[in-house]
Image (cartoon, rainbow, N blue to C red):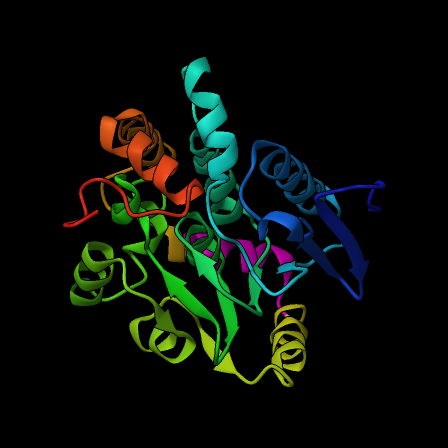
Amino acid sequence: MTSTPNALVRVSTAHGVATLTLDSPHNRNALSTPLMTQLLDALAAAVADDAVRVIVLSHTGSVFSSGADLKETAAAYEAGTVPVAMLGDVIAAIWESPKPVVARVGGPARAGGLGLVAAADLAVCVEDATFAFTEVRLGVIPAVISAVVLPRIAPRAAAELYLTGDTFDGRRAAEIGLVTAVTTAEALDETVASYCRALVRGAPAALAGAKELLRRRPTTDIRAELAQLRELSVRYFHSEEGREGVAAFREKRDPRWVPGA
């Protein structure tokens, strides 16, 4: 697998590990339609490649992912859609991958970006990485990502962080179950590599089977749940509050609902 010039997702493969690197630092690796399209293609190629045993999701720049591309979202309103509608497909592709997926988080993640982290089988972050479910502050809700976030984190923590939108650090992320391990910036790559070395020792079919056990859901198909949550998310993005929240964020001001704004 090779990357094309000006790719938003760069791919490299070595020793059975395919590293998919989000490479859109100019907008903090925001989840734009082009980036998500390329990520879906890269995930599909890695799954189809018999030489690939493990998939690592990484990033360039100081930010893992800032979440939805709000500039694209604002422009898309007139077309009657929003980019977040594709996020469910990306999350499902990561979640359903028969090959283990490891998220390498070397910097902040926000909103939809946390969905990528939670969908991965293992996630390693640096101590000073910051996280936040900022959706309510934009007048929307963390609907799509809830399909993978809520099975990961403690209910009380989910209530606190979903409702306040407050920022928390890597250690808190590990405490509540959002990430597998937290480490220093200097040890990040070696920690990820250590997990990869362990994962490639597993038999491919057995790893896929173990993932099926871990993904068993008592009542709801993940894609059916994501479809319902996607509709809910799109509805909030199109709401009056959602439009105002996106506009306020882009204009670097408080939205109208903030007292004194």
Foreground residue among 205 and 21:
21
Residue 217 visible in image: no
Which residue occupies the foreground of this view, 221 or 190?
Answer: 190
Q: Position of residue 69 (x, y in %)?
A: 50, 39
> Which quarter of the picture shows residue 36?
top right
Residue 128 on the magenta segment: no
How many marks the image carries: the answer is 0
In x, y percent, where is residue 231? 31, 26
Relative to 19, is 173 above or below?
below
Q: Is residue 208 left or right of residue 172?
A: right
Camera-side residue of 16 and 39: 39
Q: Is residue 210 magenta?
A: yes
Q: Percent position (x, y) of residue 233? A: 31, 33
Give the residue furthest to the top.
79
Q: Is residue 250 above or below residue 230?
A: below
**The residue stretch that appears in magenta:** 202-212
